Image: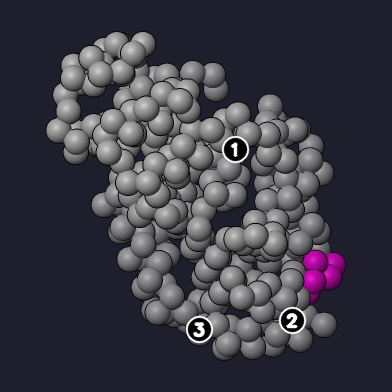
């Protein structure tokens, strides 16, 4: 929807406001020190009503004495709107939340995902993705187009430079869906293969496990070089939302740690997946 700030732009706005306040500068002092800036503009930048140009963000961050590492992260996020990723060809068909997810996955250092009903999207085979998308009618643009998007997202795990570190806890119930003839067997093979990647950790949470935080629903935690930029996506792509407050993100971080402790270890989880595949074949 036009005019609605994306989560990336809200993060930039929040950091600009936080860093200005941390520097001890008032809004009035800032506008007197930077040419071409006035109070209305600064207010729009800090409230995510206008997306500042990269050169404006850089000037503000320099004025605030921003840490170089954080400065680079924020500039990368700011410049991202002008970067043409593979998903640009689908941009008009994707809702803003999904576009944000794709962009943030591509720039995250790590992803921690808990799924209770589905195989995480970054691990799905084409056949499994097609089965799920077609039954849930997630999009009006065509099932195959959305399958293409889901599969293309997975490149973040296998790219040559800086592949994203992925840690997933998957409930046993997600491994038992009848997604079509031979589909789940191939999907289990895919999970086993992915579990051998050095940047991928997969744990299975057994159906007999005690009550756990995941009973409140699936979620994905995206981690960045600066912890206060971390975000959580809750629920599915139809009824979902971003959790941006740092304290709330930490609640999900603690919940994921508890899920990890409740699930089978990574080696035992791999054996569980292999045994599950043997039952299906």
Instruction: State which tag comes first along the sequence, 3 or 2.
Output: 3
The way the protein has been coloured in the rendering is: one colour
The answer to whether the residue labelled 3 contacts the one labelled 2, judged by CB atoms less than 8 Å apart, is no
Q: Residue furthest right?
A: 181
Q: Say which quarter of the image contains residue 149.
A: top right
> Which one is nearer the viewer's eye here, 133 or 200?
200
* Distance Cα–Cα, label 2 vs label 1: 34 Å
Which mark is first along the chain, 3 or 1?
1
Residue at the spot x=37%, y=52% of the render? 226
Quadrant of the rendering where the C terminus is positioned: bottom right
For residue 264, the mark is 3
Determine the image quadrant of residue 213. bottom left
* Residue 99's disc number: 1
Span highlighted in magenta in the image: 181-186
**273 in relation to 228, above or below:** below
Q: Earlier in the sequence, mark 2 or mark 1?
A: 1
Report which residue position mark 2 lands on: 277
Name the residue located 32 percent from the left edge and 25 percent from the top edge: 46
Q: Is residue 34 magenta?
A: no
Residue closest to the eye, 12 or 1: 12
């Amino acid at each position: 929807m036009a005019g609605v700030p994306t989560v990336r732009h809200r993060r930039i706005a929040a950091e600009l406001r936080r860093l200005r306040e941390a520097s001890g500068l008032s809004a009035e002092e800032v506008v007197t020190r930077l040419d071409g800036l006035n109070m209305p503009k600064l207010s729009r930048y800090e409230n995510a009503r206008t997306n500042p140009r990269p050169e404006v963000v850089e000037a503000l961050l320099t004025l605030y004495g921003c840490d170089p590492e954080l400065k680079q992260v924020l500039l990368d996020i700011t410049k991202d709107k002008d970067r043409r990723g593979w998903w640009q060809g689908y941009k008009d068909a994707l809702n803003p939340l999904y576009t944000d997810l794709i962009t943030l996955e591509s720039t995250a250092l790590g992803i921690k995902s808990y799924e209770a009903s589905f195989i995480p999207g970054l691990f799905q085979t084409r056949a499994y993705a097609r089965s799920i998308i077609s039954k849930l009618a997630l999009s009006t643009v065509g099932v195959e187009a959305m399958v293409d998007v889901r599969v293309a997202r997975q490149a973040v795990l296998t790219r040559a430079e800086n592949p994203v570190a992925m840690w997933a806890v998957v409930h046993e119930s997600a491994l038992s869906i009848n997604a079509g003839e031979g589909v789940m067997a191939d999907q289990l093979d895919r999970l086993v293969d992915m579990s051998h990647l050095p940047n991928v950790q997969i744990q299975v949470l057994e159906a007999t496990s005690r009550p756990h935080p995941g009973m409140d629903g699936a979620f994905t935690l995206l981690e960045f070089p600066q912890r206060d930029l971390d975000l959580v996506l809750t629920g599915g792509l139809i009824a979902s939302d971003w959790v941006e407050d740092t304290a709330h993100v930490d609640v999900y971080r603690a919940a994921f740690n508890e899920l990890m402790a409740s699930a089978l270890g990574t080696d035992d989880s791999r054996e569980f997946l292999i045994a599950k595949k043997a039952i299906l074949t």
